[in-house]
């Protein structure tokens, strides 16, 4: 079971930024890789996802959430999994 203690409490004010997200009506399959996706297929999907993030009005809020919650999978705030873990390892948590 996943540890959820690090996640923010489900208070509407904490999540209101998601209502303005550019990804709100985009399939989650754009942001989360299917099993065994590798190489150029994964790179291309991630690039398409990040292109949505880079025009998003709440990219900073999304990125801060992902770093704070240590989101393990997907594209969040224009960052991939490895990019987030590198920032977290350097002490960036929001």
Image (cartoon, helix red, strand yellow):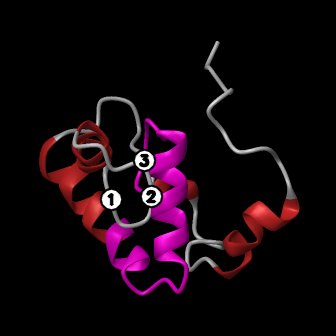
Q: Residue furthest right?
A: 12
Q: Is residue 61 above or below residue 65?
A: below
Q: Is residue 56 above or below residue 61?
A: below
In this picture, residue 58 sits left or right of residue 73: right
Question: Mark 1 falls on what kind of element?
Answer: loop
Query: Do the residues bearing badges 1 and 2 touch, measured as CB atoms within 8 Å?
Result: yes
Q: Nearer the viewer, mark 2 or mark 3?
A: 2
Question: Mark 2 falls on what kind of element?
Answer: loop
Q: CA distance from mark 1 to mark 2?
A: 5 Å
Quadrant position of residue 21: bottom right
In this picture, residue 12 sits left or right of residue 72: right
Asked if the stretch drawn in magenta spans residue 36, the answer is: no
Q: In what quadrant of the picture does the N terminus appear?
A: top right
Q: Nearer the viewer, mark 3 or mark 1?
A: 1
Residue located 44% across and 35% down the image: 72
The residue that mark 1 highlights is 79
Q: Is residue 86 above or below residue 18?
A: above
The residue that mark 2 highlights is 76
The residue that mark 3 highlights is 74
Query: What's drawn in magenta, residue-wise?
Result: 49-75
- Residue 71, percent from left and from top: 48, 41
Query: Do the residues bearing badges 2 and 3 touch, measured as CB atoms within 8 Å?
Result: yes
Residue located 45% across and 62% down the image: 63
Q: In what quadrant of the picture does the C terminus appear?
A: bottom left
Residue placed most toward the observer, 20 or 10: 10
């Amino acid at each position: 079971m996943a540890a959820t203690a690090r996640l923010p409490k489900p208070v509407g004010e904490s999540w209101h930024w998601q209502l303005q997200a550019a990804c709100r009506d985009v399939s989650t399959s754009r942001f989360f890789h299917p099993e065994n996706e590798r190489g150029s297929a994964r790179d291309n999907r991630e690039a398409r996802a990040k292109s949505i993030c880079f025009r998003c009005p709440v990219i900073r809020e999304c990125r801060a959430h992902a770093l704070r919650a240590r989101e393990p999978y997907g594209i969040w705030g224009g960052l991939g999994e490895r990019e987030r873990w590198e920032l977290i390892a350097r002490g960036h948590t929001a």
